[in-house]
Amino acid sequence: MYLTDEEKKLHLTAARSSIKSLFDLDKPIQPNYDKHPVLESRSGAFVTLTINSNLRGCIGYIISDNPLFETVYDAARSAAIKDPRFPRLKQKELDLIEIEISVLSEPFPMKNYDEIELGKHGLICTEMGNRGLLLPQVPIEHGMSKEDYLTAICQKTGVPRDLWKKKQLKIDLFTANVFSEKDLEIK
């Protein structure tokens, strides 16, 4: 999905406002849907929080029934307080976090591992009653090979690390429009 820089900034501002509202009584910002109708699209989105380039929270939705703007707002709050890997974000960390948003395409089934393009495709693996997701930027950020990426999705899904070598995993691929406060020089 194409977003203008102004629309990206609106989403990043909304994400930060959402997290900030956990600590004060500020009302959420309201978008102008007439001026920016793309903010009403029903796309999935993930919000990633980092401090000093270290993951501090990441939560999102593969698909959403809500407008994208609301999905980002909700995902940001959840990344700050509901990621089970981390304690709730503290107010003193608010100025330290960097926010990155990934707006997802609609997932589509993978036919074989050769289709996976590192840095372009995110993975959603559904195996043995579990589901795991890795965003497209993960293998690039961590210097992963395709084999490393497949091993990582197995780990994230909660199945044996080498299951991908033994059978064709049920994987859906997706792309993402990824942008951050750092990219757009806002904060």
Image (tube, rainbow, N blue to C red):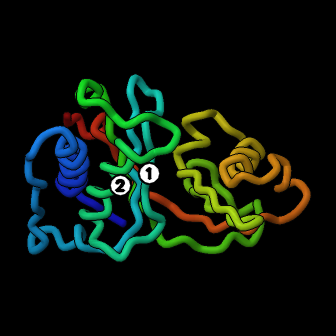
Residue at 72% x, 41% y: name it: 145
Does residue 9 appear in this view?
no
How many other residues sit within 10 Å of disc 1, few (<14), some (14-19) or many (≥20)? many
Tag of residue 59: 1
Residue pointed to by mark 2: 75
Q: Please state the horizontal and vertical placement of residue 92, each as a whole percent of the image.
A: 25, 24
Residue at 36% x, 50% y: name it: 78
Residue at 15% x, 68% y: name it: 36
Query: Label 1 is placed on what type of residue?
Result: Ile
Residue at disc 2, secondary structure: helix
Q: Are the residues tagged 1 and 2 within 8 Å (C-beta)? A: yes
Where residue 4 sits, quadrant-wise, is bottom left
Task: State the CA–CA distance, disc 1 to disc 2.
Answer: 6 Å
Residue at disc 1, secondary structure: strand
Does residue 131 appear in this view?
yes
Vertical position of residue 174 compared to residue 13: above or below = below
